[in-house]
Amino acid sequence: MRAFWSCLFVVGSLLAPGWAAAQQNAPANGLFLVAKPSLVDPNFAKTVVLVTQAEDASTVGVIVNRPSTLQLQQFLSPEFPTQNYRDPIFVGGPVMRQAIVAVYRSDAVPEAPAFHVLKGIYLTMHPDNIRKLLADPKARYRLYAGFSGWAPRQLESEFMRDGWYVLPADEASVFRDNAEGLWDELVERAMRRGPRTRK
């Protein structure tokens, strides 16, 4: 995936593969993929995807701008404390749509497996992490149904077809209260960046 990761260097963010167990101060391992207006795949049209790289060089992430009316209880067993959850479930992507994925802030390295995405921000499907988040009223997190994933070289081919802008990810955009308009804002930002977005 040399062409893809070269593109990531250009926008100033290099994804460093590895699990959260590495260390809290590890470099940022997350980016935004912003669908270009010409991308018509219904799974990703007008989406902003927060992505990170796995150890096998595959790319995983979640769509951060598709809230839904899905109910958390339909995804988790009764042992999970879902009764106090009031926020929307976002559609994370077309892969494993019945699985719950969390993106969350943690000041400490998680004990259960999680991807380190940004400073203090992690992505996980591990039930122990999700259970702790649901039980903590002060936790900052967002839940997704399913995720987005690309095998090695698959995403590179989408770049060759000119389907995505690449932008640095930021915590404020990931957790913003209203995701409406996020795609338009980031497309405008990407276009202002000019050739660095690999138009």
Image (cartoon, helix red, strand yellow):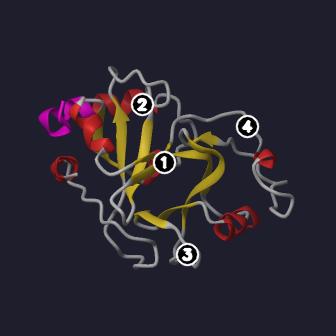
Q: Main secondary structure of the magenta part?
A: helix
Asked whether 120 or 79 is in front, the reply is 79
| Residue 48 falls inside the magenta stretch | no
Which amino acid type is shown beneath numbered disc 3? Pro
Which numbered disc flags the more N-terminal residue, 4 or 3? 4
Which residue: 36% across, 63% down? 56
Which numbered disc flags the more N-terminal residue, 1 or 2? 1
Which amino acid type is shown beneath numbered disc 4? Leu
Stretch of the chain drawn in magenta: 190-199
Where does label 3 land, which residue?
A: 110
Where does label 2 land, which residue?
A: 183
Residue 190, placed above or below residue 96: above
Residue 110, placed above or below residue 7: below
Measure the alpha-carbon separation of dots 2 and 3.
30 Å
Residue 138: where, in percent of width, then height?
Answer: 68, 64
Residue 66, placed above or below residue 37: below
Residue 179: where, in percent of width, then height?
Answer: 53, 35
Q: Are marks 1 and 2 in contact (CB under 8 Å)?
A: no
Where does label 4 land, which residue?
A: 70
Secondary structure beneath disc 2?
helix
